Image: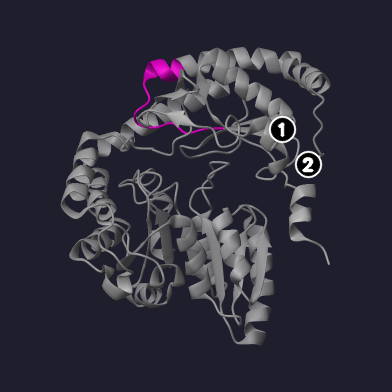
């Protein structure tokens, strides 16, 4: 019999093999100072493009005041206990009511965290008789939720409606045989590529197939749609989303999440979500602070307008420099480059050390092999000067990429330090 720890030593994982080389800098980097367009990284000021603080609410004075007052009045842990036992308050119910109204649904329910919330929603909505059909590029929380499903599941090619239709045909046969139903899952905005999910086209398939639609709109909530209600509002199909989910970790600049839909479904989830039934209630500072954040989303449209002004400046500037931004039609700004994981680290280090630009870097297994993704997240807080400085850095970067500078540096680094990584 094998010792499971021996396997861990021999195979630390696709990213784990880079731990000694990259931990603390490329992986698990440590930034300092208030969250904003400029932060400190290893003692140096950098222009920070990696916070999902789309609307710049992290350090908004009204948000800070609301959080501080709630913490002073209730403490950091009130209410103690799970919602079902002793954690229900009028403020929880008030925030749920206002969130439901904002996303144009009958009812809403608060969740402690987005990731575990989505996993638990999927687990609660389906039985072993039901079939799940989901986008192949779905976030890990969706994939892990599907893993809990004891029935059949199918993936369709990313944002490919023809592929979805074929899989719905397969799912229909299985569901009819099992006496179950079909749940389709997609995202309002895909957080790596920046593409909106094709919600309208998916909803139109309800005319041909019988299914329910669950949408994870973490990056769309607060950024898309006339009022900020998300990708469904943007595409004119919010009513066709049966179960709407979003996290507070993006536009709401906090932690927690919510799920919304018709009263019957939300009530069912309230009484059956294991991640909530067996977990402590969302703390009062986040609930009261959430009310203030939602108020700003509703009443300050100029914040979202400024966000999109910055998005358009940054994305048009990068495109003019010849960078490939894929098919993004949201605030998420992906820069796609060909290269190895080691090249990615050298490129990112150059950006941080010599140009003072901090971006997130993504390699396989999050994206296909041989690709590097630099993901920039514009916010309403970024200034024209910071955008221009970033574009100047990317102009210099373009020349180095064209000349093969980072490929040469990779060969030199591996030879000098005796590093060797397994092919991914």
Discs 1, 2 touching: Cβ within 8 Å: yes
Q: Indicate the position of residue 307 as horizontal and vertical percent values.
A: 36, 33
Q: Quadrant of residue 185?
A: bottom right
| Residue at x-position 66% and y-position 60% | 156
Q: How is the image coloured?
A: one colour
> Which of 415/321 is in front?
415
> Which of 6/346 is in front?
6
Q: Residues within 10 Å of mark 2 (few under 14, many from 20)?
A: some
Residue carrying label 1: 341
Q: Indicate the position of residue 121 as horizontal and vertical percent values.
A: 47, 68
Query: Is residue 376 located in the magenta-colored stretch of the structure?
Result: yes
Q: Is residue 237 at least partly visible in the picture?
A: no
Quadrant location, the N terminus: bottom right
Query: Is residue 368 located in the magenta-colored stretch of the structure?
Result: no
Q: Indicate the position of residue 130 as horizontal and vertical percent values.
A: 59, 78
Q: Is residue 406 left or right of residue 128?
A: right
Q: Is residue 117 above or below residue 54?
A: below
Q: Is residue 120 at least partly visible in the picture?
A: yes
Mark closer to the chain start, 1 or 2: 1
Residue carrying label 2: 424
Q: Is residue 393 above or below residue 131?
A: above
Q: Indicate the position of residue 136 as horizontal and vertical percent values.
A: 65, 56
Q: Is residue 283 above or below residue 146?
A: above
Q: Which residues are magenta?
A: 375-388
Q: Is residue 239 left or right of residue 340?
A: left
Element at badge 2?
Answer: loop
| Residue at x-position 56% and y-position 37% | 28
Q: CA distance from mark 1 to mark 2?
A: 9 Å
Element at badge 1?
Answer: helix
Quadrant location, the C terminus: top right
């Amino acid at each position: 019999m094998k010792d499971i720890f021996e396997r861990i030593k021999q195979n630390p994982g696709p990213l784990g093999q880079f731990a000694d080389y990259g931990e603390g800098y490329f992986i698990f980097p440590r930034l300092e100072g208030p969250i904003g367009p400029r932060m400190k990284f290893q003692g140096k000021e950098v222009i920070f493009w990696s916070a999902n603080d789309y609307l710049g609410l992290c350090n908004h004075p009204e948000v800070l005041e609301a959080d501080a007052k709630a913490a002073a009045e209730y403490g950091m842990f009130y209410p103690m206990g799970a919602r079902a036992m002793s954690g229900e308050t009028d403020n929880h119910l008030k925030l749920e009511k206002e969130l439901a109204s904002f996303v144009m649904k009958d009812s809403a329910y608060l969740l402690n965290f987005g990731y575990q919330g989505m996993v638990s929603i999927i687990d609660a909505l389906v039985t072993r008789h039901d079939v799940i059909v989901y986008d192949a590029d779905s976030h890990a929380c969706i994939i892990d939720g599907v893993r809990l499903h004891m029935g059949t599941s199918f993936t369709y090619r990313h944002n490919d409606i023809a592929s979805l239709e074929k899989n719905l045909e397969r799912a229909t046969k299985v569901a009819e045989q099992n006496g179950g139903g079909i749940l389709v899952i997609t995202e309002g905005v895909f957080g790596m590529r920046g593409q909106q999910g094709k919600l309208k086209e998916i909803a139109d398939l309800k005319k041909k197939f019988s299914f329910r639609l669950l949408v994870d709109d973490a990056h769309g909530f607060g950024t898309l749609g006339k009022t900020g209600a998300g990708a469904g509002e943007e595409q004119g199909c919010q009513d066709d989303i049966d179960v709407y989910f979003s996290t507070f970790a993006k536009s709401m600049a906090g932690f927690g999440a919510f799920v919304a839909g018709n009263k019957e479904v939300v009530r069912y989830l309230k009484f059956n979500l294991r991640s909530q039934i067996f977990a402590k209630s969302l703390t009062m500072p986040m609930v009261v602070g959430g009310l203030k954040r939602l108020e700003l989303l509703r009443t300050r449209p100029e914040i979202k307008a400024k966000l999109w002004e910055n998005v358009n400046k940054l994305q048009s500037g990068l495109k003019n420099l010849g960078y490939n931004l894929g098919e993004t039609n949201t605030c998420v700004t992906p820069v796609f480059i060909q290269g190895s994981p080691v090249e990615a680290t050298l490129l990112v280090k150059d950006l941080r050390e010599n140009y003072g630009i901090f971006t997130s870097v993504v390699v396989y297994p999050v994206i296909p092999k041989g690709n590097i993704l630099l993901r920039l997240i514009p916010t309403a807080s970024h200034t024209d000067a910071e955008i221009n400085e970033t574009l100047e850095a990317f102009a210099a970067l373009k020349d180095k990429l064209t000349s093969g500078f980072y490929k040469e540096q990779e060969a030199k680094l591996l030879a000098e330090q005796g590093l060797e990584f397994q092919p991914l």
